[in-house]
Image: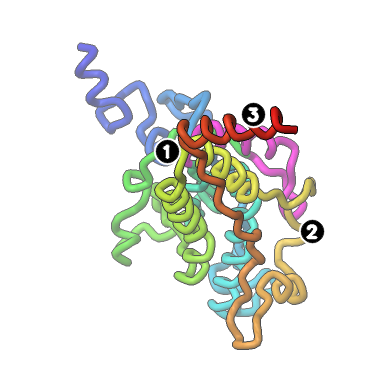
């Protein structure tokens, strides 16, 4: 019996636990659902409910004044938001994935799912988000049961064949550009490569651990303690230019890196140390 219940947990056959809440961390019935919503007490994933406010919230492709919006402006607005959230939450630990729903149903619209590599990082981020605001709106954050987004996303949407549109009960994940993804997530790959090189080049384990701790301190940067991520929903042109400064060749300028540290000295062998001590003793007796 126990094996049978475990095998159907979180599926349509489970008449006790809500399968939609288990798969996507949200349910259109909310607290009125006839099945249980088992809210996790710890998880590597956080859900920031209804956080992203798209500029065409009322009518897709049209602003609140009824004027059509250039799709490129909509994507630019979204990527500004995505980068803001990634930079702010990234200071608590490594982010495995950051997904923003493009659904229109009330229980999913603007939902942001951030999955950290470690549960402790998610717990630290959740604590720091309490009482915070974004664009003048309070941030509603909680642990999410979602750990496998392959089960949460709509496969038909990925194939451009979902006939339910924005009201689908599975996640329609809004995508960012390749350049932004490489910029945000590429830092972790570079960091891992630098750690592996330092591990192989370190002559002694204790030197490697000391340098690793120093690199982690450099890597864990903070961006200040603002209570509101941004003052408004859009970043101004000046702020955008300041964040993406360009060099003389027209490309984006990388953030300055910390100076390269010199290698730790190689310790002498026991015979060399013994000979040096004997030499010091002779010199002291002669003096």
* Residue 130 lies in the magenta-colored region: yes
Magenta segment: does it hold 131? yes
Q: In the rendered view, tell whether residue 194 sits above or below residue 119.
A: below
Residue at 60% over, 79% down: 68
Q: In this rendering, is residue 123 above or below 192?
A: above
Quarter holding the C terminus is: top right
Which residue is disc 3 drawn over?
281
Tags 3 and 2 in contact by the CB under 8 Å rule? no
Q: What stretch of residues is rendered in magenta?
A: 117-140
Estimate how packed mark 2 is, as few (under 14), some (14 to 19) or many (20 or more) residues with alpha carbons within 10 Å: few
Q: How is the image coloured?
A: rainbow
Task: Tell me the tag on residue 146.
Answer: 1
Which residue in the structure is indicated by mark 2? Answer: 231
Residue toward you, 129 or 206: 206
Q: Residues within 10 Å of mark 1 (few under 14, many from 20)?
A: many
Q: Percent position (x, y) of residue 166?
A: 44, 58
> Is 78 on the left-hand or right-hand side of 200?
right
The circle on residue 233 is none
Q: Nearer the viewer, residue 221 or 1?
A: 221
Is 230 placed left or right of 42 in the picture?
right
Kindly report the distance in space between the C-alpha atoms of the residues bearing marks 3 and 2: 70 Å
Going 55% across and 51% down the picture, which residue do you hit? 263
Q: Determine whether label 2 and label 1 are within 8 Å by CB.
A: no
Relative side of 211 to 200, left or right = right
Dividing the picture into quarters, in which one does residue 254 lie? bottom right
């Amino acid at each position: 019996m126990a094996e049978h219940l475990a095998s159907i947990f979180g599926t349509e056959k489970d008449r006790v636990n809500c399968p939609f809440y288990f798969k996507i961390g949200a349910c259109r019935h909310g607290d009125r659902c006839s099945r249980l919503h088992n809210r996790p007490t710890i998880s590597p994933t956080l859900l920031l409910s209804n956080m992203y406010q798209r500029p065409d919230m009322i009518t897709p492709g049209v602003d609140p004044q009824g004027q059509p919006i250039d799709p490129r402006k909509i994507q630019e607005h979204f990527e500004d938001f995505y980068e803001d959230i990634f930079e702010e939450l990234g200071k608590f630990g490594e982010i495995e994935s950051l997904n923003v729903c493009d659904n229109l149903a009330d229980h999913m619209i603007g939902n942001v799912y951030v999955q950290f590599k470690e549960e402790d990082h998610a717990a630290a981020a959740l604590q720091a988000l309490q009482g915070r605001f974004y664009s003048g709106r309070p941030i509603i954050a909680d642990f999410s049961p979602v750990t496998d987004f392959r089960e949460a996303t709509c496969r038909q949407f990925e194939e451009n064949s979902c006939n339910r549109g924005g009201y689908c009960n599975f996640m329609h994940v809004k995508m960012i550009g390749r350049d932004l993804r490489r910029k945000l997530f590429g830092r972790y790959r570079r960091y891992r490569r630098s750690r592996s090189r330092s591990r192989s080049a370190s002559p002694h384990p204790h030197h490697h651990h000391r340098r690793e701790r120093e690199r982690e301190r450099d890597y864990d940067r903070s961006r200040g303690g603002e209570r509101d991520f941004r003052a408004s929903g859009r970043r101004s042109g000046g702020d955008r230019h300041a964040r993406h400064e360009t060099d003389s060749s027209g490309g984006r300028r990388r953030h300055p890196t910390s100076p390269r540290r010199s290698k730790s000295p190689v310790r002498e062998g026991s015979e060399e140390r013994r000979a040096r001590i004997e030499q010091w003793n002779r010199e002291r007796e002669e003096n």
